[in-house]
Image (spheres, rainbow, N blue to C red):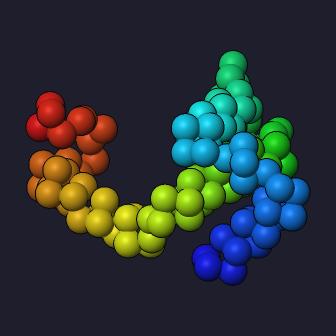
Amino acid sequence: MDNVIQQIIQFRDERDWKQFHNSKDLAISLTLEASELLENFQWKDSEVAVNEKMDQIKDELADVLIYALMLAHDLDINIESAILNKLKKNEVKYPIDKFKGTSKKYTDG
């Protein structure tokens, strides 16, 4: 993952784009790209969308991840630790015996 992050940062820095990439604008861009990802599924059955739009889905998902990784890098967040910590929190929120096979939110449990 470190190699990918370094390539993203190198790409950005070679173009002198860091000046435009403050935390707020990276978060906004991440959300916009997530919306573009979602647009590939709009008005379609999920399986149909995946079959018809896989290339676009890959590109938009990559954009989401690029912005997320840039934001984590700039905020000095170790993304692996952040994910593992969040999984631990979710294990407490969503114990297997109460939530296995259900889409209920923890507040409904």
Relative to 7, say whether 38 is above or below: above
* Residue pictured at 66% horizontal, 70% vertical: 5
Side of 94 relative to 64 (left or right): left
Coordinates of residue 99 in the picture (x, y in percent): 20, 48
Side of 67 relative to 7 (left or right): left
Relative to 91, say whether 53 is above or below: above
Q: Quadrant of the N terminus?
A: bottom right
Q: Quadrant of residue 43?
A: top right
- Pick the residue in front: 68 or 18: 18
Q: Quadrant of the C terminus?
A: top left
Relative to 96, say whether 28 is above or below: above
Residue placed farthest to the top in the image?
Answer: 43
Coordinates of residue 77 in the picture (x, y in percent): 44, 65
Q: Quadrant of residue 62?
A: bottom right
Side of 52 relative to 103 (left or right): right
* Residue pictured at 45% horizontal, 70% vertical: 78
* Residue pictured at 39% horizontal, 64% vertical: 83
* Residue 46 seen in this snapshot: no
- Pick the residue in front: 58 or 48: 58
Q: Quadrant of residue 12?
A: bottom right
Coordinates of residue 56 in the picture (x, y in percent): 82, 43
Side of 59 relative to 78 (left or right): right
- Pick the residue in front: 76 or 109: 76
Residue placed farthest to the front in the image?
Answer: 19
